[in-house]
Amino acid sequence: MIKDGFLWVIRVLVGGLFIFSGLIKVNDPVGTSIKLEEYFDVFSNDIAGFFFYLKPFALEFAVILVVIEVVLGVMLILGVKSRFTVWALTLMILFFTFLTFFSAYFNKVTDCGCFGDAIKLTPWQSFYKDLILLVLIAILFLFQLDLPKKSPFWAKIVTAVCFVLSLALSVLAIRNLPFIDFRAYKVGVNIPQNMLPSSPLQYSYVMKKDGELLTFDQYPSDETLEFVEMNLKNPEALPKISDFAVWNDDGDFSAEVFTGDKVLILVSSMLKVSDSNLEEIDQLIKDLKDSPIQPIFVAAASQEEITSFMSEREWGILGLQADATVVKTMIRSNPGIMLLKDGKVLAKYHHNNTPTSSEVLDFYIK
């Protein structure tokens, strides 16, 4: 009886964590695919070259991964196909533990994306989390004969419904935008303010004297002390955005983007840009030309590529360069649309939902 209760608690803990982790990533499978691309890049250089050829399928792998996480968590809690579930979870956690150890030890991918953008963990925190899960799943593996051998029909129905819902929500999030935006560029955020510390940064200074380490809140004036290191005491005050910049051959335009009413057309990759709704974006830009709202094209590309693309589309607007990682963080759509008013994010659109000029104007006259 005690053993059954103990195993039930582990099933709920492990299953609940997998469901939680999976649902966060179901909310943003594009973000998971971006993280997988990072791993494929690293593995292609450090392990085997064939990982490079998996990059074009990162989004498909991401959807499979997040759906499996949710479904296995449900199956474990409900006792559906217990032996299969425990074997699958064992293989998954071994794989995840390898990934997080690789990231932590070699400092290759500094954020595993275990909980998407909702909860940020350091590589070592992610590894320790996976070690705990590995121990818990190992217990279930050792006692798998004591797990439910059969499950009621309703449990199988619930599992099937969870599978369909997870898959459907993933596809919806891909074809639109994440249902919940956890990133630093979400609607309502003032980007220039997010680029500043939330409070004054405080540091401690570690010095050495006669072999003894001493810590000071202010840099000491004693010249006999040897400087060792400086540590940030309140890292939570660091700017949420530290890498935003837009520019062209004429210089940096970040301040200009944060002034007045702007509509940013964002492209994270010219090679992968979708052309399915470019006509709607063409019309939006054309309709806004005589309005007080300035459309700006921001792309992770060379100035020549930007100029050529705008010339081909006959946009005739300001074109700026940006870092690909920044653009991917700003919006999970390629191309995507962001409305700004003095640097504040008013709205974000997937290109499948390109707004009309009247819809855009409504945001600025409210």
Image (cartoon, rainbow, N blue to C red):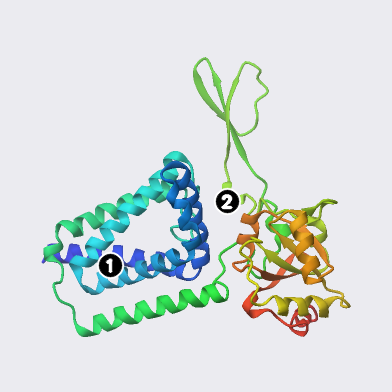
Q: Looking at the image, is mark 2 or mark 1 nearer the viewer?
A: 1
**Quadrant (top left/top right/bottom left/bottom right) for the C terminus:** bottom right
Residue 184 seen anywhere in this rendered image of the structure: no
Relative depth, front residue between 337 and 237: 337
Q: Are marks 2 and 1 in contact (CB under 8 Å)?
A: no
- Locate residue 11: give its quadrant: bottom left
Is 339 positioned to the left or the right of 154 in the image? right
Q: Residue at x 86, y 75 (%)?
A: 289
Compared to residue 315, the image places residue 249 above or below, namely: above
Identify residue type, mark 1: Val
Q: Residues within 10 Å of mark 2 (few under 14, many from 20)?
A: few
- Give the alpha-carbon distance from disc 2 to disc 1, as whole Å: 32 Å
Residue 108 seen anywhere in this rendered image of the structure: yes
Compared to residue 93, the image places residue 288 above or below, namely: below
Q: Residue 163, how many percent across, how many down?
A: 35, 77
Outermost residue toward the right in this view: 290
SS type, badge 2:
helix
The disc label shown at residue 260, or none? none
Is 266 positioned to the left or the right of 94 in the image? right
**Quadrant (top left/top right/bottom left/bottom right) for the N terminus:** bottom left
Q: Residues within 10 Å of mark 1 (few under 14, many from 20)?
A: some
Identify residue type, mark 2: Glu
Is 300 positioned to the left or the right of 79 in the image? right
Q: Residue 12, how many percent across, how many down?
A: 27, 67
SS type, badge 1:
helix
Q: Residue at x 27, y 72 (%)?
A: 75
Residue where numbered disc 1 is placed: 12
Q: Residue at x 25, y 69 (%)?
A: 76
Relative depth, front residue between 15 and 360: 360
Q: Name which of mark 2 and mark 1 comes first in the sequence.
A: 1
Q: Residue 352, how many percent across, how many down?
A: 62, 78
Residue where numbered disc 2 is placed: 236
